[in-house]
Image (tube, grey):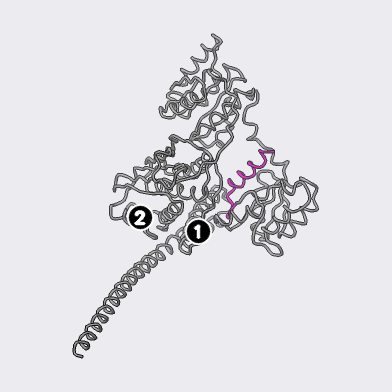
């Protein structure tokens, strides 16, 4: 009996010890959770305090500049200055709101990827247009180069991919001093160079962004991808931001099964590396009528760019001759014309060692006549230089960062089909006045803004206050009366999705062909997907960017 009692006591003691151990583990877990909750609350409190300041800063500029503009309404230059500052402050305020909303969707698990086919050259061009303007404002040297590219057409989430890359380059611009240097490079890995075997068959897109800016401490690098974290020192004190950008980037890269890492040193600069697996999209090889074996004169002083152009031309079976000086090129062409041994085309780069590229173009056009093909390969904004370039005799423009397909397609269009008799740029000049759009918008102020933006470029505009009225107007109109329908989403009577579906379902030829473009404040990737599922061709988010609006119109009208 005594032994049984001792055994029971021993069992109770063990049970008690186990309960104590369980309670200790639970207490330790609760303490850890409490610390995490306190840390999260502290971070959020600091974030709210920072956001209060960051939101009030652009709001103060908007309200203040509005008051100053109204007080000086008769002084055009003063009002114009106020409007520019209001526009800048509004764009910054919009970026703050977008960051907060993106982080909210990530935390709630509502952020999803939208897989679709896309063109890598188009993606890189869009990124270049966005970030180059930011760098120009700070007089920074922004260089975007293209390494070895094996597949130009890919499948992935281009919207979120662009968000990742623009955020990283934008931070480099933001945290680099005036007249600093930022170098961006895109390339792809071969299959045998892939980072992990589970991604066999994928194309790894590799992105690098290096700057000589303020840099980051080793301590901050351990927290850089945590929400609400920002570098705090004297140099960055006046730089606005939420501290959410890098956290959003890390979450998106992880969702894409990619890898991101960063190297940095205070006072020296930073370098971000991103590798993301994407699927290649098979494409029928474009028919290029290039005269094999013929010479092409390449005038470019920047060695890497010149070598890249020459390599592309050699791969296409052409014989590139490279020069650094514009005057040397004019002399060489003069001799070649005398000897009746002219190259099939002239490729002018952005950087020449002696004189401006457009000055060379003007000399060559006068020398060689109107049929000789002259192509400008440049990273400049074509819209700003188009008039001067065409006047100087340029036939075609190839944008940088440079992709092989764009260079060879432009060259083929001139030397392979006799297109040089035209100026090669006719598709850039569109008579917008011959086109009619239907604007579907229920809010009077938004309707007024959109009508004004469209009318400014000569487009004929008719308006409807809701989706049902839009369906009625389209049904009552002759076929092909409307070229584009800009469709709001949230409207009384009938929303934009339903209106689009009803238009697509009509028994008339143009119902399937008319472009329907969502113009809405629903700006997330999921909203773009819903718009496409409803039968829409494009998506423009509010507030409406005039450049984005014109880009959509140009893309549609240039196809006709």
Viewport quadrant of the C terminus: top right
Q: Is residue 547 above or below residue 356?
A: below
> Is residue 68 or residue 205 the one in the foreground?
205
Instruction: Please give the count of numbered marks on the rendered protein.
Output: 2
> Is residue 138 or residue 418 the one in the foreground?
418
Q: Which mark is residue 213?
A: none
Viewport quadrant of the N terminus: bottom left
Question: Residue 216: x percent and y percent?
Answer: 31, 51
Q: CA distance from mark 2 to mark 1?
A: 21 Å
Q: Which mark is residue 111?
A: 1
Residue at image location 65% in from the left, 57% down from the top: 488
Give the extent of the magenta segment: 540-560
Residue at image location 41% in from the left, 65% down from the top: 48
Q: Is residue 556 above or below residue 447?
A: above
Q: Which mark is residue 224?
A: 2
Residue at image location 26% in from the left, 82% down from the top: 16
């Amino acid at each position: 009996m005594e032994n049984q009692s001792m055994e029971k006591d021993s069992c109770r003691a063990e049970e008690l010890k186990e309960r104590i151990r369980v309670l200790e583990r639970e207490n330790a877990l609760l303490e850890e959770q409490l610390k995490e909750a306190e840390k999260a609350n502290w971070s959020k409190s600091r974030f709210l305090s920072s956001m209060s300041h960051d939101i009030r800063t652009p709001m103060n500029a908007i309200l203040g500049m509005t008051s100053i503009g109204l007080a000086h309404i008769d002084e055009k230059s003063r009002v114009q200055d106020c409007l520019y500052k209001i526009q800048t402050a509004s764009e910054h305020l919009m970026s703050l709101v977008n960051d907060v909303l993106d982080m909210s969707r990530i935390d709630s698990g509502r952020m999803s990827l939208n897989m679709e086919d896309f063109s890598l050259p188009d993606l890189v061009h869009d990124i270049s247009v966005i970030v180059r303007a930011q760098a120009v404002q700070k007089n920074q040297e922004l260089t975007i180069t293209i390494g070895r590219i094996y597949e130009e057409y890919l499948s992935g989430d281009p919207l979120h991919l662009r968000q990742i890359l623009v955020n990283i380059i934008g931070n480099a611009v933001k945290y680099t001093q005036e007249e600093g240097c930022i170098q961006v490079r895109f390339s792809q890995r071969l299959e045998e160079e892939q980072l992990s075997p589970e991604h066999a068959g994928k194309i790894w897109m590799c992105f690098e962004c290096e700057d000589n800016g303020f840099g980051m401490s080793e301590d901050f690098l351990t927290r850089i991808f945590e929400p609400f974290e920002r570098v705090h020192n004297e140099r960055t004190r006046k730089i606005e931001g939420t501290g959410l950008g890098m956290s959003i980037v890390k979450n998106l890269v992880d969702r894409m099964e990619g890898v991101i890492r960063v190297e940095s040193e205070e006072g020296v600069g930073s370098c971000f590396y991103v590798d993301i697996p994407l699927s290649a999209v098979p494409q029928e090889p474009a028919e290029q009528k290039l005269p094999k074996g013929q010479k092409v004169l390449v005038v470019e002083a920047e060695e890497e760019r010149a070598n890249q152009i020459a390599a592309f031309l050699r791969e296409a079976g052409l014989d590139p001759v490279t020069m650094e000086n514009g005057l040397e090129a004019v002399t060489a062409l003069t001799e070649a014309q005398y000897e009746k041994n002219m190259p099939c085309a002239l490729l002018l780069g952005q950087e020449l060692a002696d004189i401006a590229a457009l000055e060379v173009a003007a000399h060559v056009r006068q020398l060689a006549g109107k049929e000789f093909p002259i192509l400008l390969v440049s990273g400049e904004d074509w819209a700003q230089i188009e008039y001067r370039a065409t006047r100087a005799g340029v036939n075609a423009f190839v944008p940088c960062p440079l992709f092989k397909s764009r260079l060879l397609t432009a060259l083929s269009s001139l030397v392979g089909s006799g297109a040089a008799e035209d100026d090669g740029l006719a598709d850039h000049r569109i008579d917008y006045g011959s086109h009619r759009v239907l604007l579907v918008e229920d809010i009077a102020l938004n309707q007024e803004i959109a009508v004004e933006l469209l009318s400014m470029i000569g487009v004929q505009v008719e308006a409807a206050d809701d989706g049902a009225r839009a369906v009625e107007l389209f049904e009552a109109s002759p076929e092909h009366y409307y070229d584009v329908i800009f469709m709001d989403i949230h409207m009384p009577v009938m929303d934009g999705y339903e209106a689009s579906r009803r238009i697509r379902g009509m028994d008339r030829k143009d119902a399937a062909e008319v472009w329907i473009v969502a113009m809405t404040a629903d700006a997330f990737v999921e909203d773009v997907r819903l718009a496409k599922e409803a039968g829409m061709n494009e998506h423009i988010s509010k507030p409406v960017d005039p450049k984005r609006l014109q880009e959509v119109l140009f893309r549609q009208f240039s196809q006709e």
